[in-house]
Image: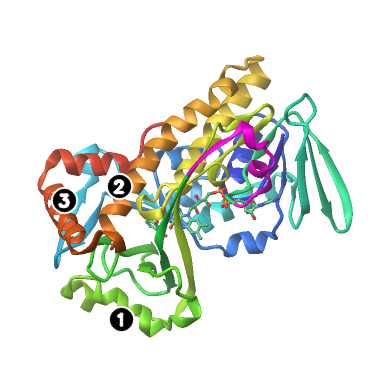
Amino acid sequence: MAIVGAGPAGLLLAALLARHDIDAVIVEQRSAEYVLSRIRAGVLEQTTVDLLREAGVADRCLQEGLTHDGIELSFDGGLHRIDFRALTGKHVTVYGQTEVTHDLMRSRAGANLTTDYEAADVEIEGFDGEHPVVRYVRNGVVQELACDFIAGCDGYHGVCRASVPREAITTYEKVYPFGWLGVLADVPPVRPELIYANHERGFALCSQRSKARSRYYVQCSLDDQVDQWSDDAFWDELRRRLPAEIAEAVTTGPSIEKSIAPLRSFVAEPMRFGRLFLAGDAAHIVPPTGAKGLNLAATDVGYLARGLAEYYLEGSDAGLDEYSARCLSRVWKAERFSWWFTSLMHRLPEAGAFGFRLQQAELTYLVGSRSASSALAENYVGLPI
Ligand code: FAD
Ligand code: DHB
C-alpha cells in the first residue's frame, strides 16, 4: 500500500493495516513537526476511539481524554444542556487531533515503519490499471513507489483527488460567508462541558483540551486577518457572545495559538477510482460546528482497512467494492447534520433579523422537545461503524 498524507486518516489507516501485517509506506509533503503544529479538531466519537483501540494506539486517549456526557447550547441569554447520556446512552471523548496524531506517529516510529516526510512534487499514476505508482522527490532524489493500491489521505488541497480525470468525478460544494477565529490558551475551561453559543454578534464555541487548556472560537469575517485580533480583542468578543454569568467566569490568558479557518461543505463522488481510494478531507469537508471532520476521516479508513484486510487475507474484493457507497452514506448524514447545526448557530448575513428570530424559535423548540434534542444528540455522538 502507498498512503499519501500523514494526517489522522493516513496515519490511522497505516496503523490498522499494520495490525494485519499489510505493508504500507506513507508519503507526506510536510515535516512531522509541521503536521503536529496544526491545531484542529477536539471531539472524538466512540467509534473513533474504538478504531484507535483496534489500531493499538488508544492508551493515552483512554487515560487522558475527557468523557463528556453532554453539551450546552447558549441563546437568548440562557444556557440549556443536551444530555447525551440520558438521550442516547452514549458520550464523546474530548482529546485533541494533535494528540491523536502524536500517538499514531509514536507508535509508527516504535514499530520502525516508514513515513517519508518532506516529500516534494508528489505525483500518482497508473491507478486506473494494475500497477499504480507514487513518485516524489526526497532530499533531491526521485523516489518511485510501486504498489497494489494508493490511499489518497492528503486532505482537501492534496494531489490525489486532483489526479482523477474530471469526467470521472462529481463534486458538491457550499462555501459559507464567514470563518472561525480559534484561540488555544493554558487557562481552565469556563465550564466542564462545551458551550455552543448563538448570539446576535455571531457564533461562539467554548471547548477544551484538558482541565488546564482551553480552545475557544468566535465566528469572524472572511476578510479578518489573525494579526488584527489581539488577545484582548478576542477575549472581549468571546465574552460578549456568552450569557453574563458565563462571561464573568471565563479565565483569560495569553494565546498559545491563534488561527482563522474558512467553513466549507464539500463532497467528491465516488471515493474509489480503480486502485485509488480517497479518504478523509481528500474526499469531503464539513463545516466544523458538528465536530465531524476527524471522525469521518477515521470511519473512512476503518472501512478501507477492513476492505483491504478481506482482500489480502481472504482474497475477497467485496469490502473494497463497497467502500465508496458505505463511506458516502455516512458522509452525507454528517454533511446534513453539520450544515444544519452551522445554519442554526451562526449569524447568517443574508437571513437578517427575521432569520435570527427564527433561530431563537428553533432553538427554543429544540431544547424543549425530547425528540428534537435526541436527534441532535444522536447525530453529535455519531453512528456505529
Ligand atoms: P489532513 O489532516 O488535512 O491531512 C492531510 C495530510 O496530507 C496533511 O498532513 C498534508 O500535509 C498532506 N498532504 C497534502 N498534500 C499532499 C501531497 N501532495 N503529498 C503528500 N502529502 C500531502 N474538524 C473538527 O471536527 N473540528 C475542528 O475544529 C476542525 N478544525 C479544522 C481547522 C482547519 C484549519 C482545518 C483545515 C480542518 C479542521 N477540522 C476540524 C477538520 C479536521 O481537522 C479534518 O477533518 C481532519 O484533519 C481530516 O484528516 P485528514 O487526515 O483527512 O486530512
Ligand atoms: C472543537 C472543534 C469543533 O469544531 C467542535 O465542534 C468542537 C470542538 C475543538 O477544537 O475543541
Displayed quadrant of residue 186: bottom left
Q: Which residue is mark 2?
A: 340
Other residues around mark 3 within 10 Å, as few (<14) / some (14–19) / many (≥20): some
Report the span colored magenta.
Answer: 157-172
Query: Callout 3, which amino acid?
Result: Glu
On residue 362, the disc is 3
Displayed quadrant of residue 280: top right
- Residue at the extreme top: 315
Q: Is residue 164 above or below residue 266?
A: above
**Res. 175 visible in picture:** yes
Query: Callout 1, which amino acid?
Result: Asp
On residue 195, the disc is none
Q: Which residue is mark 1?
A: 236
Foreground residue among 279 and 51: 279
Q: Nearer the viewer, mark 3 or mark 1?
A: 3
Other residues around mark 2 within 10 Å, as few (<14) / some (14–19) / many (≥20): some
In three-dimensional space, the C-alpha distance between marks 3 and 2, rounded to whole angstroms, equals: 11 Å
In three-dimensional space, the C-alpha distance between marks 1 and 2, rounded to whole angstroms, equals: 28 Å
Q: Position of residue 140 (x, y in %)?
A: 88, 58
Magenta stretch contains residue 186: no
